């Protein structure tokens, strides 16, 4: 046991401190969402905050992977985290002098998204370098566990601090968590030397093409990524719709509780992923878990006006997400050569996550301009019986549409993915 702990010492240090920093960052993001919804009352305006984060992430990810593979991973993470922290300080200052505007948040989130775009591939490779191969599934489960705990903690911490002490206190906590993570990475993490397959003569475009070429030669990895892009489209639309469903009916506090339930479910799912035996078919596990998730949560939220049922829906929708994520991570890490992982992970980020800003915009637009006006003008008793009346009923209708779309996506993609076989040593 002691040898196993020592073998993962660097992982535990990096994982715990980076998770703490992510908790602070996401708490700030949630508090800003509450602040923005109070200012605008618009699902689309609120969703646009996240859209601005993801647009540079999607556009620049391919080139960010080339940067990650060429330059020192640790220095890349330190520089990107520092610049992202600077934007948080800027929000703090603007808020304190009562000059914070909506466009400030959009611009700052775009810059933070760019820094995360460069940092994320370097982080993925760093974990690969410090984790023994036989521990991939366990550590993937632990990473899912920390993401789950963050999902629980950030809305509750943000709601409590924002309601009691204000946005500036939430940001201050974020900056403290950043400082801890920065010092841990700087002082305690040592990465092994990694021979690079690239040369100084190769430009970024050529390096980026290598990631795309790898995916073309490995259709299993490509189709898993494209399937997850479809899942992200529906899930991000759900994220845009959820505040418009919950806040008009039950307020900010209920939104924090409902959001936290997804984190509780992911904690349980992460524990399952950490201890479960290797599945016979990892690919099949991926699409079946998503079929269960998308085929339950959306319908429970669509048809109920009871917060307890919303919480149950969140639990069912998220409990198997860590199992999916762990299996996808194992496939990627076992399939992609370490020297290419930065480039391929970056291409994955572009292909798998480009649907997130689209889904956020689509979900917000559908609620604000189609579903809510439709339900406001609706005189049909059966629609009112299904989705309720007043503000929030249009969001419930949109949840139903997302549920149907999720089932169709998983059934169609499952047939495609069945033709691929994945084996590992």
Image (cartoon, rainbow, N blue to C red):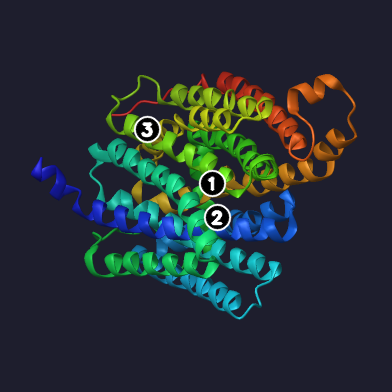
At x 45% / y 40%, what residue is drawn? Answer: 263
Provide residue 328's location: percent of width, then percent of height.
43, 35
Mark 2 falls on what kind of element?
Answer: helix
At x 79% / y 32%, what residue is drawn? Answer: 389
Please tell me which residue lies in front, 296 or 417: 296
Q: What number of labels is visible?
A: 3
* Residue 105 visible at all: yes
In the image: residue 410, left or right of residue 48: left
The local crowd at label 1, few if under 14, some if 14 to 19, many if 20 or more residues have their Cα within 10 Å, is many
Quadrant where the N terminus is found in the figure: top left
Provide residue 182's location: percent of width, then percent of height.
34, 68
The local crowd at label 3, few if under 14, some if 14 to 19, many if 20 or more residues have their Cα within 10 Å, is some
Q: CA distance from mark 2 to mark 3?
A: 23 Å
Residue at numbered disc 2: 30
Quadrant where the C terminus is found in the figure: top left
Q: In the rendering, which numbered label is found on residue 256?
A: 1
Query: Which label sits in the foreground, 2 or 1?
Result: 1
Q: CA distance from mark 3 to mark 1?
A: 19 Å
At x 77% / y 36%, what residue is drawn? Answer: 394
Provide residue 216's location: percent of width, then percent of height.
54, 39
Q: In the rendering, which numbered label is found on residue 268?
A: 3
Q: Are marks 3 and 1 in contact (CB under 8 Å)?
A: no
The local crowd at label 2, few if under 14, some if 14 to 19, many if 20 or more residues have their Cα within 10 Å, is many
Provide residue 15's location: percent of width, then percent of height.
31, 53
The vertical placement of 231 against 247, above or below, is above
Q: Earlier in the sequence, mark 2 or mark 1?
A: 2
Q: Earlier in the sequence, mark 2 or mark 3?
A: 2
In the image: residue 146, left or right of residue 258: left
């Amino acid at each position: 046991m002691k040898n196993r702990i020592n073998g993962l010492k660097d992982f535990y240090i990096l994982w715990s401190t980076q998770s703490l920093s992510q908790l602070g960052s996401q708490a700030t993001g949630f508090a800003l969402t509450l602040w923005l919804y109070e200012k605008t009352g618009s699902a689309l305006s609120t969703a646009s905050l996240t859209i601005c984060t993801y647009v540079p992430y999607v556009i620049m990810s391919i080139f960010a992977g080339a940067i990650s593979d060429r330059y020192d991973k640790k220095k890349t993470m330190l520089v990107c985290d520092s610049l992202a922290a600077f934007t948080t300080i800027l929000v703090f200052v603007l808020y304190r002098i009562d000059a914070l505007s909506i466009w400030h948040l959009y611009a700052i989130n775009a810059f933070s998204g760019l820094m995360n775009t460069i940092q994320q591939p370097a982080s993925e490779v760093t974990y690969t370098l410090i984790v023994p191969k036989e521990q991939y599934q366990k550590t993937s489960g632990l990473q899912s566990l920390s993401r789950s705990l963050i999902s629980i903690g950030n809305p509750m911490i943000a709601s409590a601090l924002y309601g009691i002490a204000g946005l500036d206190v939430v940001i201050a906590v974020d900056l403290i968590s950043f400082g801890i993570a920065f010092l841990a990475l700087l002082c305690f993490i040592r990465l092994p030397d990694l021979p690079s397959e690239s040369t100084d003569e190769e430009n970024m475009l050529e390096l980026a093409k290598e990631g795309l070429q790898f995916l073309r030669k490995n259709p299993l990895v490509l189709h898993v990524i494209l399937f997850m892009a479809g899942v992200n489209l529906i899930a991000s639309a759900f994220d845009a719709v959820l505040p418009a469903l919950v806040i008009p009916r039950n307020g900010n506090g209920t939104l924090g509780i409902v959001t936290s339930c997804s984190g509780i479910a992911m904690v349980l799912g992460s524990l399952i992923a950490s201890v479960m035996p290797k599945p016979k078919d990892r690919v099949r596990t991926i699409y079946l878990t998503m079929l269960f998730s998308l085929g339950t949560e959306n319908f429970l939220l669509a048809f109920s006006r009871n917060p307890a049922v919303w919480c149950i829906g969140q639990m069912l929708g998220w409990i198997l997400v860590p199992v999916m994520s762990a299996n996808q991570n194992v496939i990627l890490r076992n399939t992609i050569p370490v020297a290419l992982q930065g480039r391929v992970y970056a291409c994955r980020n572009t292909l798998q996550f480009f649907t997130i800003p689209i889904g956020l915009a689509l979900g917000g637009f559908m609620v604000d301009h189609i579903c809510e006006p439709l339900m406001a003008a609706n005189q049909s008793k059966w629609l009112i019986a299904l989705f309720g009346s007043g503000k929030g009923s249009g969001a419930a209708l949109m949840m139903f549409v997302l549920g149907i779309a999720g089932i169709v996506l998983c059934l169609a993609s499952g047939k495609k993915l069945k033709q691929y076989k994945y084996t590992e040593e």
